[in-house]
Image: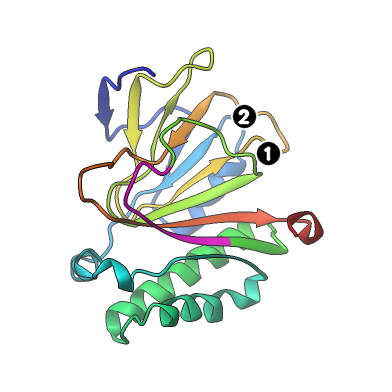
Amino acid sequence: MNIVSKITEAVPVSVEIANNPASLNAIHQKGCAAVVWSRQTPPEIQTWIDDLPPKYLPSGRVIITPEMIAETVKDLFDAVGMLSGSEREWLHADITSLAGTFSRLMSAKYLRLRLDVVTNNACLKFHVDAVTSRLICTYRGSGTQYGLSTNGSDPTRIFQAKTGSPILLRGTLWPAKSPVELRHRSPPIEGTGETRLVLVLDPVSNLEEEM
C-alpha cells in the first residue's frame, strides 16, 4: 500500500465544486468524475452531532421510494431513541433534502439509503463503487478521502471532503466512461477513538435485482 504523502483541500481538475444543491447537476458534464458541495453545518448543529453519545446515532440500510424518505429517516432516528428538538429537526430535514435532490438528479425510482456509525477502518482501500453513482455525506468525523489513481495504484496526493460537505461520485456503472481514475475511501481512524456518522445514497433502478 502506498503511503499518503499529503492531504489537501484543493481538488483535481475532474472534480467540480458546487455552492448549492442545484450545482450537483455538474456530475452529468463531460469530464466530471465527482462533485463536492462545499458547505458547512451550522456550528450549533455540528456541536450537537459531535456530542451525541454513539448509541443515539442512527444507523440502518433500506431500499425505499423517494416518497418514503422522510418517514424512513424519522423511523431510523426513533429506533435509537434520538430526542426531539431543533437539532434533530435540522438533521432530519437535511438528510431528507439530500436524498430527494439525489433521487431527482439520478431519476431514481428507488434509493438505497444507508446511515453508518463508523469507529474503525471501514473501507481502507481506494476504490470505485460498482454503482451508477453514489452520494456520501459525513455528518460527524472525518470526511471521505479521494484522489487520482495511476495504473491502478493508490493515489499519492489525497483530497478530503469536509465534514458536512456531500460528495457525489460516478461509479463503474455510469453510462459514459469517466475521464479519469478517481478513487475514494473511508479515512483510516482505527485506534483514534473517532466516531463517524455517514450517509450513503445509491440509485436503484431494478428492485428485483436487489432482492
Question: On the rendered structure, is 25 left or right of 55?
Answer: right
Judging depth in this view, the residue of 146 and 35 nearest the camera is 146
Q: Residue 210 in the image: x percent, y percent? A: 73, 56
Please tell me how crowded label 1 is: few (under 14), some (14-19), or many (20+) other residues with Cα within 10 Å: some
Q: Which residue is mark 2?
A: 178
Secondary element at image label 1:
loop
Q: Which mark is residue 174?
A: 1
Q: In this orientation, does residue 67 appear?
A: yes
Give x and y (percent) for residue 64.
Answer: 65, 69
Q: Is residue 51 above or below residue 162?
A: below
**Quadrant where the C terminus lies?**
bottom right
Marks 1/2: CA–CA distance:
8 Å
Q: Secondary structure at mark 2?
A: loop
The vertical placement of 78 against 28, above or below, is below
Q: Which quadrant of the structure image shows residue 53?
A: bottom left
Q: Callout 2: few (<14), some (14-19), or many (20+) C-alpha neighbours within 10 Å?
A: some
Q: Residue drawn 49% across and 63% down?
A: 98
Disc 1 and disc 2 in contact, CB within 8 angstroms: yes
| Nearer to the camera, 203 or 175 | 203
- Report x, y in % for residue 67: 64, 76
Residue lying at 47% horizontally and 58% vertically, measured from the top left:
21
Look at the image and give the residue range highlighted in magenta: 113-122
Image quadrant in which you'd find residue 50: bottom left
Disc marking residue 52: none
Q: Is residue 139 found inside the magenta-colored segment of the image?
A: no
Which SS type dominates the magenta stretch? Answer: strand
The amino acid type found where label 1 is placed reads Trp
- Quadrant of the drawing holding the N terminus: top left
Is 187 rendered above or below residue 58? above
Percent from the top left, x then y, of residue 79?
Answer: 44, 80
Q: Residue, x 44% and y 39% (percent of image)?
A: 123
